Amino acid sequence: MIPSVARNRQTFINEQRYYEENEKPQKNIIQNMAKMQHDGIPTRLLDFSTDPLVALFFATQEKERADASVYLLIRHSYDAESEEVKFSSFVATRRNRCLENLVNSFNEKRDNFISIQKAEQILKHGIFIRPNTINDVENQRMIEQKGTFAIPGNQIKNGNVTDVVPFENDSSYEEIVIPFEYQEEIRQELSKRGYTKSRLLGEKDEIIRYKSLPENNNRKIDGKYIRKAYCQYSVTIEMINLMTANEIKEVGYQIARNSGANSTWIWFRRIGFEMGNNIMTQHWYQK
């Protein structure tokens, strides 16, 4: 997990300029960065939510035919007013990334003294900001999303902060995969519960549309008829590109209708998956 400001070198070099251009003097550093993050401006923050349905909403907003993931992390967190959060966010406001210079500049603005050793210890490790400790009534997106943030650690070489490191994985990390086939249905259910773009982002709600599937997207495997007292047809369908549950249902209906059988069993699986590892099973009856 890499924050937006560190995804290319030029953006990282311009981090201090992004902050300066968007800074509001009446807000503290972390409030400014939180607002920038929610406005789509590159920052060193990573978005998290304490509401799993908010996380599920954002995970299922992509327009690609691909699985999504929700990440569950159980970590120690720090108050937004803590020394750790203040110093980690302070780095974004300085162009000079010499550790000694950062510490001196930081100490000038505070009553308490932070040592270079302590500063290096803070910056080398990613930290979570405790939920509900960034108080900003003007940041409606953060409020609606029940949002909080993490600040990744930094790479330090020869006494200089040279890069942001990916947020480390450890034993308190869990990935929950959301199969593409069911994302459309999940979005519909979330919408019924009020998890929409208009509420969470203040943007116009829109239906996500995927690219059309090629005509040869589905390959029939082991199709066979069994004729006893009635006619039964069974077939496995291997999907080259992923399909939504509704698309799979429509394909199944057409296969069953064209089979002419009284009973049709269809197993849908992804390309490359072994027999029996099916994403959906259908049983159709001919009236």
Image: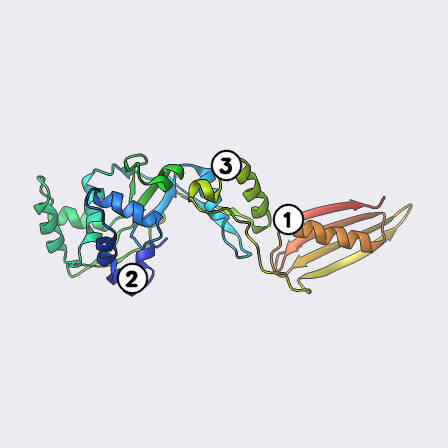
Q: Position of residue 67 (x, y in %)?
A: 53, 52
Dot 1, how many residues are within 10 Å of its Cα: few (below 14), some (14-19), or many (20+)?
some
Number of the front mark, 1 or 2: 2
Q: Answer above or below: position of 280 versus 218.
A: above
Q: What residue is pinned by disc 3?
A: 194
The disc, 1 or 2, on the residue closer to the chain's N-terminal end is 2
Q: Position of residue 263 (x, y in %)?
A: 82, 47
Q: What residue is pinned by disc 1?
A: 245
- The residue nearer to you, when weighing 74 against 9, is 9
Q: Position of residue 215 (x, y in %)?
A: 68, 64
- The residue nearer to you, when weighing 56 against 236, is 56
Q: Position of residue 139 (x, y in %)?
A: 32, 41
> Quick check: 179 left or right of 90?
right
Label for residue 80? none
Name the residue rendered at 56%, 39% in the picture: 189
Name the residue rendered at 53%, 57% in the picture: 64
What amino acid does circle 3 point to? Gly
What amino acid does circle 2 point to? Thr
Helix, strand or loop status at disc 3: loop
> Quick check: 32 left or right of 98?
right
Q: What residue is pinned by disc 2?
A: 11
Helix, strand or loop status at disc 1: helix
Dot 2, how many residues are within 10 Å of its Cα: few (below 14), some (14-19), or many (20+)?
some
Name the residue rendered at 53%, 40% in the picture: 191
Q: How is the image coloured?
A: rainbow
Q: Residue furthest front?
A: 204
Q: How many marks?
A: 3
> Quick check: 229 left or right of 87?
right
